[in-house]
Image (cartoon, grey):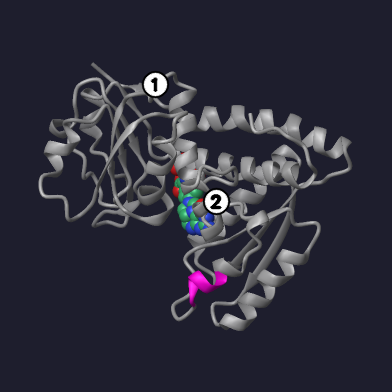
Amino acid sequence: MTAQILDGKATAAAIKSELTVRVEALKAEGVQPGLGTLLVGDDPGSKWYVAGKHRDCAEVGIASIQRELPATATQEEIETVVRELNENPECTGYIVQLPLPKGIDTNRVLELMDPAKDADGLHPMSLGRLVLNETGPLPCTPNGIIELLRRHDVEVNGAHVVVVGRGITVGRSIGLLLTRRTENATVTLCHTGTRDLSAQLRQADIIVAAAGVGHLIKPEDVKPGAAVLDVGVSRDGEGKIQGDVDPGVAEVAGWISPNPGGVGPMTRALLLVNVVEAAERAAGIDHAG
Ligand SMILES: Nc1nc(=O)c2c([nH]1)NC[C@@H]1CN(c3ccc(C(=O)N[C@@H](CCC(=O)O)C(=O)O)cc3)C=[N+]21
């Protein structure tokens, strides 16, 4: 058996074409959504991601507001740009590209952001709202994973999802989405302290691999027919990017997300969703959909 593909690239394209329609509707109401990005330093990877986000914006009609600071920027200089973006009416949502340089208090920067403009869904206010079942921006990668499953008709309701990794952007937050009554999954959160990871994984109907450990998930860990989502990014001995899922898993799983081409494009698409929804909320348009 070879797993069916959870095609993130195609699904992200479909979401983007739906967003184009919503952006047109906003423009008809006189609202122009705009995504701001703050990039500090000159890490080539971060530059590339940020450029990709602005390319996505152009595709769906969202304006781009780009702010850059050198790697030597101080906490105060970064916070000044955050305040400017908070007040800039052209910026309806924004992200501070992570990680910030060493020595910068990241949480202090993020807490300074206007929660109404949080495009990542990772502001403490947004995460708090998620815990409290209130509407607000959702974390992009978890939301992208759920949307990817939904659009491929993979049953989440009643499923046992085993998540590997306790990072803020994926591991810690995805359980909050999956256990809402609308998703209705049962979630086990595993991490490096989990005693018998293989035993946990073998119970899973759906595996979310977000540990950042190359090829951590082996074919023998996977229940035949399970859906496996590869979120991980790490480098092998030769510096080549690899996912958390061993290629052999495709022979056992029922569904697999390629990496690249799976969760990454979905993260970017759901960022755009957050920008459009924030602009809709600000304009008093109700499109929770
Ligand atoms: N405030 C903030 N928000 C983020 O969302 C954020 C961040 N900081 N810092 C860095 C990480 C990383 N990240 C990626 C998103 C999409 C792809 C993506 O689309 N990757 C493509 C291909 C990448 C390639 O070919 O190199 C894919 O998986 O198919 C990758 C990485 C968002 N991040």
Q: Residue at x 49, y 31 (%)?
A: 147
Residue, disc 1:
154
- On the image, the x and y values in percent for residue 185 come to 35, 30
Q: Secondary structure at mark 2?
A: loop
From this viewpoint, is residue 73 visible?
no
Which mark, by number, is residue 32? none
Name the residue furthest top. 1
Label 2 Cα crowd, 10 Å radius (few <14 / some 14-19 / many 20+) = many
Residue 210 or residue 284, whichever sits in front: 284
Label 1 Cα crowd, 10 Å radius (few <14 / some 14-19 / many 20+) = some
Q: Secondary structure at mark 1?
A: loop
Q: Residue at x 80, y 56 (%)?
A: 90
- On the image, the x and y values in percent for residue 266 come to 51, 38
Residue, disc 2:
121
Classified by dominant secondary structure, the portion drawn in magenta counts as helix
Q: Is residue 125 above or below residue 68?
A: above
Quadrant of the image containing the N terminus: top left
Q: Disc 1 to disc 2, how far (Cα)? A: 24 Å
Q: Earlier in the sequence, mark 1 or mark 2?
A: 2
Q: Residue at x 54, y 77 (%)?
A: 71
Amino acid at pointer 2: Gly
Q: Which residues are magenta?
A: 105-109
